[in-house]
Image: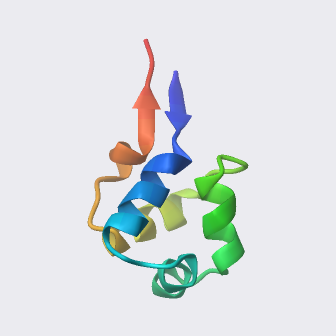
């Protein structure tokens, strides 16, 4: 099973010293979407996953946990 892990998004954002608004601006969405993703209330679509990965210089797969 593959599970989205919003805390990984939050940790990387904070590691880079970025606010949710700054990340949102970089990927072309609203800052509340970043908060929703960080709290695991939803996960980004493929488009935003790729944009997040690029903006945060992190592999898209690193945002997920892989359970067997």
Q: Is residue 22 left or right of residue 16?
A: right
> Percent position (x, y) of residue 34?
60, 67
> Percent position (x, y) of residue 21?
57, 83
Q: Quadrant of the C terminus?
A: top left
Q: Quadrant of residue 38?
A: bottom right
At 49% from the left edge and 80% from the top edge, which residue is drawn? 27
Q: Is residue 64 above or below residue 22?
A: above
At 55% from the left edge and 76% from the top edge, which residue is drawn? 20
At 59% from the left edge and 58% from the top edge, which residue is drawn? 44
Residue 53 visible in the snapshot: no
Colouring = rainbow
- In the image, 62 versus 35, the foreground residue is 35
- In the image, 18 versus 56, the foreground residue is 18
Q: Is residue 14 above or below residue 18?
A: above
At 50% from the left edge and 29% from the top edge, which residue is drawn? 2
> Percent position (x, y) of residue 22?
49, 85
Q: Quadrant of residue 65?
A: top left
């Amino acid at each position: 099973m593959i599970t989205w892990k919003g805390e990984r998004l939050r940790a990387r954002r904070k590691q880079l010293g970025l606010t949710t608004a700054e990340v949102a601006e970089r990927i072309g969405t609203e800052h509340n979407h970043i908060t929703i993703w960080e709290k695991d209330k939803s996960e980004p679509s493929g488009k935003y996953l790729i944009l997040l990965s690029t903006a945060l210089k992190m592999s898209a797969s690193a945002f997920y946990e892989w359970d067997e």
